[in-house]
Image (tube, helix red, strand yellow):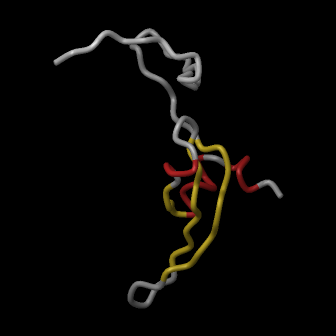
């Protein structure tokens, strides 16, 4: 059974304004590098970086190849 909604000022939703283009899509981009590690599957060592993405917070961070991220987003590696 449905009940009438009673407004409560303590129930405030926090939202982030996202700019969209004409096709109603947005551009996803990395914010910063959180962590670094190396994996050695078989005989080759692969360098990985954990990247935080815009609009995803810390739970949306993913492990990406360091070399690919360096080519696509060099500003993340300026130390």
Among all residues in the image, which is located at the extreme left? 1
Q: Residue at x 51, y 82 (%)?
A: 45
Q: Is residue 2 above or below residue 77?
A: above
Identify the residue at image location x=55%, y=21%. 18
Left or right placement of residue 17 versus residue 76 in this view? left
The structure residue drawn at horizontal position 57% and vertical position 61%, both measured from the top left corner, is 50
Q: Which quarter of the figure is the C terminus placed in? A: bottom right
Give 49 or 42, whichever is nearer the viewer: 49
Q: Residue at x 54, y 57 (%)?
A: 68
**Position above or below: 62 against 8:** below
As displayed, is residue 64 above or below residue 54? below
| Viewport quadrant of the N terminus | top left
Residue 64 image point, x, y percent: 50, 60
x and y, in percent, of residue 51 in the image? 58, 54
Horizontal side of residue 5 vs 19, given as left or right? left
Is residue 35 positioned above or below 12 on the image? below
């Amino acid at each position: 059974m449905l009940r009438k909604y009673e407004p409560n000022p303590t129930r405030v939703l926090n939202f982030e304004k996202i700019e969209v283009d004409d096709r109603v899509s947005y551009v996803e981009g990395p914010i910063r590098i959180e962590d670094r590690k190396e994996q050695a599957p078989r005989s080759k060592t692969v360098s990985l970086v954990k990247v935080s993405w815009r609009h995803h917070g810390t739970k949306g961070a993913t492990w990406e190849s360091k070399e690919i991220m360096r080519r696509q987003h060099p500003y993340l590696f300026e130390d």
